[in-house]
Image: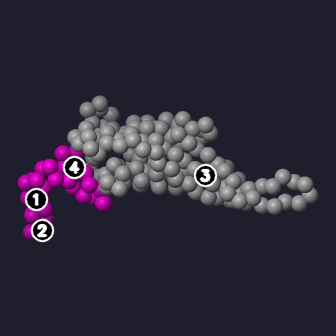
Amino acid sequence: MLFAAVICFILICPSCKLSLNGASIPAAMKTIRVDFFENNAALVVNNLSTTFTEALKDRIRNTTRLSIVRAEEADAVMSGSITDYSIAPVSINATSNNVAPIAGLSRLSITVSVKYVNNLDKKDNFEQSFTKTENFSGDIATHEQTLIADLNKQLTEDIFNKAFANW
């Protein structure tokens, strides 16, 4: 009975927004194009562009009813680039015997510039940079792919919320 009422409401109110997992997607929106996010950072990691772009597509694919398309006439478009990938020391370990100090804790930071165009409702459009950081100890090579996966998850969550949850 409740299911039938919900279906009737959706059919009666075509301009209403559907909500899935906190997302507020217009009922008329069916497709989205997610362009490849090129890595324009000074420090380049070979697979970062691909892993980020696929993580963003997966977030949309797994939590919305939207079809990801390559067509120019998509209802919405996400594009942008990776603008920063940096590693910086957070704390320094003291050393003895005139040896240069070493980082005790370091921070990986990734910044992504995103342009979102909603072709159905221009007031939802935005251009914004999103930055996430993760601290780690030891050598970056040991932690890099795990850190990238964690940061991609956080970045895609923020981007998704900005586009579809109006956060």
State the residue lying farthest toward the front: 123
Q: Reply yes or no: does residue 95 show up in magenta.
A: no
Question: Which quarter of the rendering shows the C terminus?
Answer: bottom left
Mark 3 vs 1: CB contact within 8 A? no
Question: Residue at 43% across / 51% down in the picture?
Answer: 156
Quick one: label 1, few (<14), some, or many (20+) residues within 10 Å?
Answer: few
Q: Which marked residue is nearer to the observer: mark 1 or mark 2?
A: 1
Mark 4 vs 1: CB contact within 8 A? no
Circle nearer the N terminus (4, 3): 4
Residue 165, percent from left and from top: 31, 55
Provide the secondary structure element on which disc 1 rests: helix
Q: Which residue is mark 3?
A: 108
At label 2, which amino acid type do we have? Leu
Q: Which residue is mark 2?
A: 2
In the picture, residue 3 is in which quadrant? Answer: bottom left
Q: Which residue is mark 4?
A: 26
Q: CA distance from mark 4 to mark 2?
A: 22 Å
Q: CA distance from mark 3 to mark 1?
A: 47 Å
State the residue lying farthest toward the bottom: 1
Quick one: label 4, few (<14), some, or many (20+) residues within 10 Å?
Answer: some
Mark identifier at residue 9: 1
At label 4, which amino acid type do we have? Pro
